[in-house]
Amino acid sequence: MLFLSTFKNVLDLKKRVIIPKDFRLSLGDINSFVAFRSHKTSAIDCFSMKKMQALSEKIDSEMDPFSMDRDSLESAVFADAIVMRFDKDGRVVIPDLLLEHAQIEKNIAFVGRGTTFQIWEPELFSIHQAEARKMLLKK
């Protein structure tokens, strides 16, 4: 399961958007994914439920159950996560909380990140991608 490439789309008046077919195929028979506000960028992070389960297991096995770092991570990710279910046409409704965080009003970019994907406002992603390329070229 890999999410590759960048796809652009538009929100309809009901704040629905069609998830790219390639991304839906990468999710397999599961008609949902998990979305939450990125804690690093103005994007929406999207994981399969299987990936969220793996993250939870990693946190359980590697972090002190009473540490502040663990509490922060769980509060920023799990408490914020929303299960997004497709309708029969492959659309999801994106909640206002996520749209506001990503500064999305109408246009959307779905950005593959290997085993996860992100949802961006396309112009903000273009800026982010250009900065990421500059950082890589400096190394």
Image (cartoon, rainbow, N blue to C red):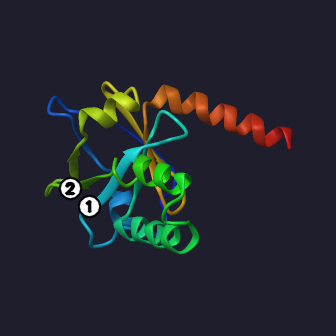
The residue drawn where x is 68% and y is 38% is 132
Amino acid bearing label 2: Phe
Please tell me which residue lies in front, 2 or 7.
2
Contact (CB < 8 A) between labels 2 and 1? Answer: yes
The residue drawn where x is 20% and y is 32% is 12
Residue 112, given in percent of the width and then of the height, sits at 50, 52
Badge 1 is on which residue?
32
Q: Quadrant of residue 13?
A: top left
Query: Crowding at label 1, few (<14), some or many (≥20) Cα neighbours within 10 Å?
Result: some
The single residue placed furthest to the front in the displayed view is 66
Residue 15, given in percent of the width and then of the height, sits at 20, 34
* Marked residue nearer the N-terminal end (2 or 1): 1
Badge 2 is on which residue?
86
Query: Crowding at label 2, few (<14), some or many (≥20) Cα neighbours within 10 Å?
Result: some
Q: Is residue 120 left or right of residue 30?
A: right
Q: How much space separates mark 2 and mark 1, taking CA atoms?
A: 6 Å
Residue 87, given in percent of the width and then of the height, sits at 15, 55
Residue 27: in sight, yes or no? yes
